[in-house]
Amino acid sequence: MPRDSNIFHNLVVCENDCTELFCNLLSIKVFRDAVLDLFGCGHIKTQASATDFATQASSAGGRPDIEASGDGYRILIEIKTNAHSALTTYQKAGYEKIFAEGDEGYQHLVLLAPSNYVYLRTLDEVVRPTLKRQNPSVQVSVVSWEAIIELIEQNELDVLSPFFDQFAGLLRGWFMPPLISFGYSEIKMLFSADTAKALRKLRETVDHVEAASKGFATYKYRPKDQSEYGVTFHNEDGDDLLFFGIWNEFWENHGCPLCLAVDDDWNSPVAKTFGNRSYTNEIISFGGWKVLPLPEELLASDSAPSAVWEFISKLLNKSN
């Protein structure tokens, strides 16, 4: 998930991170109450407070991911973000020991996992019977992360706070990826050696232009989501002047594999050149950028990188 679409980018990247974030959000009463209802223990809402919830609390039975304990109750929340992450032998024995430590009247184990978690059978055939033998009234339930997303949306918590909106977005990216299907023409195109060759040549063209741009300061632009593959030119003061490269979203919308672009907020000489009448009919406003698609004839030349660089260098020199 790209940084500009989620504030938790590179902050929440694993199960432990997700556990800490989830526990922190439980400090907000409206979310905590809704989650307790979802878990099936809404009757303790009036007793439960933010300080009742802790992560990795050590005990003789181990360290549950999240433990909530208060006057007359103890809830253990086992967090799984990987559908193929099994319950360990230590975890399975640990639940019993932890519940045996105290004399809480209400005991509840919750497994919070993806809806396609593959080890539910272990919970049903090993963990649940073991706990029930010790305390027949102990509750064991399974809740999916998808249900947490639905809870946030149904209670409009994503409107209440951007943190819930971003958390739901993070979970959606992890557990509810978009359905992707390919059309017949797309499949034929993908299973063509020419497609792979053309994509390689496009990237090589960007690389060669960067190598040829001696005298101009540049930096590579290669986001992890591979949405762009390009280079940005800037002046001696570090101010951005011009982006060149493959911008997938623009390509999908306008059918142009290579483009030049300036941000609407840039006040560079190149940006002013883009506003000249000679470019008016060629410039496309797209996503807060002024974009100039590179014409087909440049790629059709005997040396595409040389032709493209000549086109770009003229624009940069004209703007000096």
Image: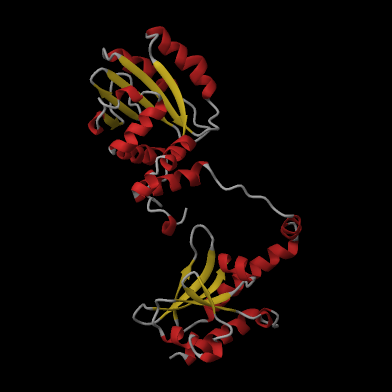
209 to 320, vertically: above or below: above
Residue 100 visible? The answer is yes
**At 42% from the left edge and 10% from the top edge, which residue is drawn?**
132
Near-viewer residue (201 or 239):
239
**At 36% from the left edge and 82% from the top edge, which residue is drawn?**
236
Residue 37: percent from left, percent from top: 38, 28
**At 74% from the left edge and 61% from the top edge, which residue is drawn?**
193
How many numbered marks are there?
0
Q: Is residue 230 left or right of residue 23?
A: right
Residue 108: percent from left, percent from top: 37, 20
**At 40% from the left edge and 8% from the top edge, which residue is drawn?**
136
Near-viewer residue (207 or 184):
184
Residue 268, image quadrant:
bottom left
20 to 135, vertically: above or below: below
Residue 26 visible? The answer is no
Q: Is residue 297 left or right of residue 140?
A: right
Q: Is residue 248 left or right of residue 242?
A: right
Residue 187, image quadrant:
bottom right
276 to 253, vertically: above or below: below
Residue 174: percent from left, percent from top: 49, 44
Residue 263: percent from left, percent from top: 44, 75
310 to 41, vertically: above or below: below
Q: Is residue 89 left or right of residue 191?
A: left
